Image (cartoon, helix red, strand yellow):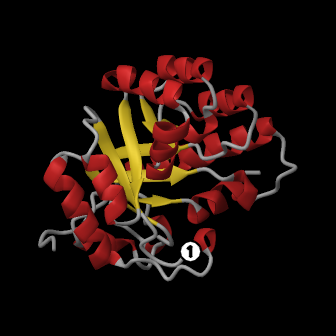
Amino acid sequence: MKSDNPTIDTLVLITNRQLLNDDISLDLYGQALSRGIEKIKQNDKAVDDLEEGNWMGKFPHLYTLCRDTDLPFEEYLQLCDTIGSTVVYHGKGITNREQLRIVLEKAKRIHMPSNLLRYWQSEQQELWNTLQQQWAHVALWSTIHDEEDVQLLTSLPIPNLECVLISPIFSTVCKEGHPGIGVSRGEILLQQIQNHYPYVKGIALGGIHKNNYIECLLHTFNGVAIMSDFMKQVHSNI
């Protein structure tokens, strides 16, 4: 466990407009996202102490994982452009080689969950080969749920594995019925992946909020990912 004062190194905001209103226009949603992100950035500059209402206020690294992959591809790109420099693209929105080419030209970071990596390996060989040829030029993110995911990632020579989201740490409505793996279990998985990728950042995901995020930071997690609390802030800007 960490012995120093825990602080958030990396804060990941995850978008999911389905938590709001599916009928919301893309323009309005994008504007609300931008305002929500900007408010959190302003908290970082303004808050000296982590008060209860501003627990997301201190962090050196901020990213926004665009999870709205149910959008048509062009609309997904438009939303990512609206989010701006903090955006992390999601590989699930890519269905053909041309789309992958476009994203690789635009993106600094792409999130490829372990189940998507497996699917591309077995069912989308053209996409998989193209990604491997180009992944030295992009920071790759992935997700870990168990030892099988760790084994998959350690079997791949990923040159720039920047972050792994370890999930679900706590119970969450996004994984109904799952009790969460717990912080200690998540820390073990993080240590296993860091044995192979020493510089990868471990991000706690799943049911994170103001009353439990410090528990994650007291262990070896570098930061936390939030969706529900972020979407509440986005909703307040609509």
Label 1 CA crowd tier, 10 Å (few <14, some 14–19, many 20+) = some
Residue at 78%, 41% in the rendered image? 28
Left or right of 226? Residue 140 is left
236 left or right, relative to 123: right
Estimate the x, y position of residue 58 in percent, counting from the top left: 35, 56
Res 19 → quadrant = bottom right
Q: Residue furthest right?
A: 23
Count of numbered tags: 1
Question: At which x and y percent is residue 124?
Answer: 54, 33
Residue furthest front in the image: 122
Q: Name the residue nearer the viewer: 189 or 85.
A: 189
Q: Is residue 46 left or right of residue 230?
A: left
Q: Residue at x 64, y 31 (%)?
A: 95
Residue 202 appearing in the image: no
The residue at the point 37 percent across, 79 percent down is 182
Secondary structure at badge 1 equals loop
Badge 1 amino acid: Thr
Q: Position of residue 1 (x, y in %)?
A: 16, 74
Q: Residue 170's spot in the image, x, y percent?
A: 46, 77
Residue 98 seen in the figure: yes
In the picture shown, does residue 189 fall above or below 65? below
Classify residue 150 as left or right of residue 191. right
